[in-house]
Image (cartoon, rainbow, N blue to C red):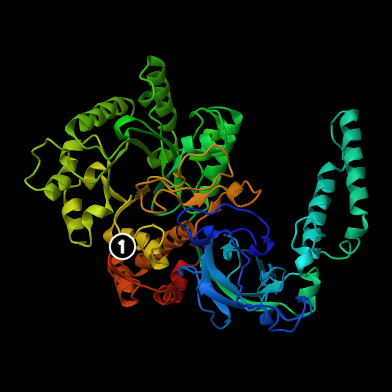
Amino acid sequence: MESGQPNSAAADKTQNSSVPPVEGVAGGGTSYGWVDGGLQASSLGNGAIDPTKIHSADLLHVWSMPSTANVSQQEAPRPLEHVNLLAARNERESFQIALRPKVSWATSGIAGSVQVQCTDLCSSAGDRETSAIWVSLNVPCGQQPGLYEGEIFISAVRAEAESRGESLTKSERYQLYKELRNCIDITEPRDYSSSEEMVQRLTSASTTLRRMLALPSFQDCEENNGLGDMMDEDIMNNVAVRLKLSLTVWDFTLPLTPSLPAVFGISETVIEDRFCLEHGTKGWYDALDHHFRWLLQYRISPFFCRWGDSMRILAYTCPWPADHPKAKEYYSDPRLAAYAVPYAPILSSTDAAKNSLRREVEILKSEAHWSKSYFYLWDEPLNLEQYDVICSISNELRSYASDVRILTTYYCGPSGSELAPSTFEAFVKVPNVLRPHTQIFCTSEWVLGTREDLVKDIVAELRPDLGEEWWTYVCMGPSDPQPNWHLGMRGTQHRAVMWRVWKEGGTGFLYWGTNCYEKAMIPSAEICFRRGLPPGDGVLFYPGEVFSSSHEPVASTRLERILSGMQDIEYLKLYSSRYGREEGLALLEKTGVYLGPDRYALDHGPIDVMRGELPSMHSCLGGY
C-alpha cells in the first residue's frame, strides 16, 4: 500500500468505514478488508463462520514480503516463511505482511476483518525490542546486540466485534487500563508546595480514576502486568496464524547526525489551508513543530517553505527567531544535519526586516551549529537577471557573516549568456557565474541522464578549497528507469536514489516538497496530486485525518524507502572507512545492488547480500 501506515495496526480497520481514496493509488492505501464475490462461506459449510472456532490459516493466506516489494491487489499468495532481519542500533528495519482471503466470514459476501498482534522481541538474555506495524522495528541506541525472536499473530475477527462501538478486546482494555493507571500516578497527591485547593482537586481526580478501574471490565487486568498475558481468546485458543520473526542487532550504532544532509521541504501554505490555521498563531506554531519533529525520524533535515514570484523561495528550518528558546532546541538537535536560515526581506524589504535578518545571523554565527546553516534563496534561476539578484543578496549576507553558505538549485545555464557553445557546457560553467555568491551548487539528476561520466565535468568546475560543495536533487525528472520517487516505480528504484547519490559522490541532497498536494480546506479532504506533476511527485506523507481520527501524519512507502536508502549510505560510509571508498563502490557492484542509474537491483535479494557483508566489520565498528 502506498500510504504505508507504519505505526498503526491494519486489523483495526472496519468494512463500514468510509475513507476517501488517494488519487493515483489503487485502493487508496486504505482498505484492509476485502470484497471477493468468488469466495463464499459455502466452501467451509453452510451458515455463518465463527472465526474463533476455525484456524485463521483456513480463512486467510498470510505471507511476508520485503520492504522494497510493491504489493499489488492481485499479488499471488506465497508460503509463510520465518522473517529474518539485520539491523544496527539506531536503525529502523521494515518488512511487509501480505494478506489475502480464502473465504468470506462476514456478512454480504465481505471477507471480514483481521486483527494483528505481536509479542515482544526477546533475546536469550531477556532484553526486549519494541515493534511497530507496517511492520517496522526501531532499534534504540542503547539496545544490547544479539539475536531477538518473537511472533506476530494474524487472526480473523468475529463480525459482531468489527464495529468500534462494540466491546473492547482484552488487549484494548489492557491498554486503556495502563493509561488510567498512569493517570493515577500523575495525579496522586504528594508533598507538593501547591495550594490546599490544588491538592483537593488532585485527590478528587485520583478518586474518580480509581472508581473507573474498579469497573468489572478491568478486573482481569489487575493480575496481569504485560500484553503477553492478555492476548485475545482466539489467539489463546491457538487459531491465529503465527509469523515467526528474528532480528539480529549488530554491535555498532548508526550516527545520530546523518552523514549526508538531506533537506526536504514542507509547504507552510498547504498546512495553513488544510488545517485552517492563521499564520503566526499558536496553532500554526504547534502544527509546524509537529511536522518538523515527525520528519526527523526519517534522517531528513526538514525546512519549511513559501513560494514567491519567479521561483523565489522563503526557506527556514525553525519558525521561531534565533533568540527564542525553541530555536536553540531546533538548531542543536543532533538529528539535524543542515538547517535553512530565513531570508526575511524576501517577503518585505523594509528596514525592520533587514535589521531582523542581521540580528538572526549575528546570533546564529556565534553558535557551534552555524556550520550546518545555509540560505536557500531562489529555486532554479533561469536568466542573468535572476542570477544578479542572488549575487546582490549574497553580498548583503556576506557583510553579516563572511562564511555564510548559499544553496542554489539549477538544471541549466542562464539564458542570454555566452558561457559556452552548448547547453550542457553552459550548465557546467554556472559556478563561474555564481562564485563567490553560492557555496552549495545543487544540480538536477535529470541533467545527467544515465551518463555518470558527466559528474567529473561538473565536479571539476568546483572549488572545494573555497568551501564549495556539490549536492543533487530530483524533481519531476528523471523518469523511468532512473531512480526517483514517483508512484508506480519499483521499490528498489525508490531506494536507489540514495545509492546513486553515494556512488556519484554528492555531499548533500535536496527534495522540494513532502506535502505539496492540491489545495484543500479541511484536514480530512481527499488527497489529490497536483496536475502536471508525475504521480507522487512532491508528496511523501499524508495527513492522518484522511484515514482515521489520528492527527499523526501517515508515511508513504516511498518515505520509508527513503529512510532505508539513508541508512544504506551510513552502512557504505562505515564500510568505506574500514576498507576505502573504492572497496565500498566494489561492494555495490559485486552484490549487484547498484551499478548505474539504469542498472541496479530489481528485487530485494542483493540488498540482503550487501548487508550480509557487514559482519566482517564488527571488530572495527564496535562502539561507533
In the image, 57 versus 96, the foreground residue is 57
Which image quadrant for residue 144?
A: bottom right
* Viewer-side residue, 462 vs 457: 457
Q: Residue furthest left?
A: 421
295 displayed left or right of 355? right
- Is 596 displayed left or right of 266 in the figure? left
The spot of residue 346 in percent (x, y) is 36, 26
Q: Which residue is mark 1?
A: 480
411 to the left or right of 594: left
Mark 1 Cα-neighbour bin, 10 Å: few <14, some 14–19, many ≥20? some
Check the image and report above or below for 11 versus 511. below
Q: Which residue is painted at 47% across and 35% down in the image?
A: 269
Q: Tell me if residue 600 comes above or below residue 207 in the rendering.
A: below
Query: In this view of the protein, which residue sits in the foreground, 531 or 565?
Result: 531
Q: Examine the image and state in which quarter residue 574 appears.
A: bottom left
Residue drawn at (85%, 35%) of the image: 192
**Residue 474 seen in the figure:** yes
For mark 1, give the secondary structure. Answer: loop
Whether residue 90 is visible: no
- Where is residue 224, by image quadrant? bottom right
